[in-house]
Image: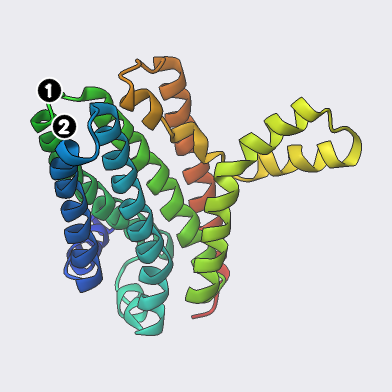
Amino acid sequence: MKNIWTIAKNTLKLETRDKIWIALVAFGLGYIAIMLFLSDLVLKELPMVKAFALLGIYFFNVVIALFLGTTSFYRDVERKTVYFILAKPVSRAQFLLGKFFGLCLVIFFTSVALAAAYLFVVASAGGGFDAMGLLAIFMQFLEMSLFIAFAIFVSTFSSSLLSIIYTSAIFFLGHVVSQLLEDARKIGITGIRYIFVNILYYIFPNLEKFNIRDFAVHGVATPWVSLGFALAYAAAYIILLLFVAIWIFEKKEI
């Protein structure tokens, strides 16, 4: 655990010094700050302010997670940093887990900064303390953690560019598979096509399970059973992805 924590801390320090991360966080904070002025000029209703602010937080977290998840591991391999780390009493599994937790910490602190700005804007717009908004941001963090796990997984066997393509494709499919299955049932699709849609639904992660922004925007309580299931779903998927990633990394020649 000590080695994993050390690698995680070093990853956090390294990535938070990156100019791209700093610029993205600055843009994110600037975007949310603009909501404060637009709330009086354009976004007359509080739900609109919440909707645009939460969507902005989600967008910047996705960009950061995609950037970090697909480049951090590959960059260490390209710069031979991994050789120096593995030359020490550090296993490949510890290295990979350390990278994962370090990148999750980056997303966590990013989410905390953007959440603080969000709460300030909502309170200034007359919404008080928005607990549901915080919950929605936490669910976004869970999704980003799964997103990073998948990005690290594909990074173990592909280049940085291909990792971006694969991860982006999974992100897109992860948000449409549930709708595809629902539409297939409504239309009455049967046979091979319905089986194919079901295969897509069960193979690819259903990222819509973490989307509770609409509930937060309108102040509707989310069932705790659904939240607990989403948490268990994220944990199971992350464990599976990291397990396979470690297995591939152990077999890989670097």
Which residue in the structure is indicated by mark 1? Answer: 128
Residue 212 higher or lower than 248, as above or below: above
- Report the label total: 2
For the question of whether residue 159 can be seen, the reply is yes
Residue nearest the viewer, comparing 134 with 3 = 134
For residue 18, what is the image quadrant? bottom left
Residue nearest the viewer, comparing 197 with 127 = 127
Q: Nearer the N terminus, badge 1 or badge 2?
A: 2
Give the x, y percent position of residue 24: 24, 62
How far apart are the alpha carbons under marks 1 and 2? 7 Å
Q: Is residue 98 left or right of residue 153?
A: left
For residue 90, what is the image quadrant? bottom left
Question: What type is the residue that disc 2 sits on?
Answer: Val
Residue 39 higher or lower than 17, as above or below: above
Residues marked 1 and 2 touching at CB (< 8 Å) = yes
Question: What type is the residue that disc 1 sits on?
Answer: Gly
- The disc at residue 115 is none
Q: Is residue 84 left or right of residue 225?
A: left
For mark 2, does the 10 Å Cα neighbourhood hold few (<14), some (14 to 19), or many (20 or more) residues? many
Residue drawn at 89 percent across, 41 percent down: 192
Give the x, y percent position of residue 124: 8, 32
Residue drawn at 32 percent across, 32 percent down: 136
Q: Is residue 204 left or right of residue 155?
A: right
Q: Secondary structure at mark 1?
A: loop
Residue drawn at 13 percent across, 40 percent down: 116
Which residue in the structure is indicated by mark 2? Answer: 122
| Colouring convention used in this rendered image of the protein | rainbow
For the question of whether residue 250 can be seen, the reply is no
Residue drawn at 57 percent across, 54 percent down: 170
Q: Secondary structure at mark 2?
A: helix
Give the x, y percent position of residue 181: 70, 34
Residue nearest the viewer, comparing 165 with 229 = 165
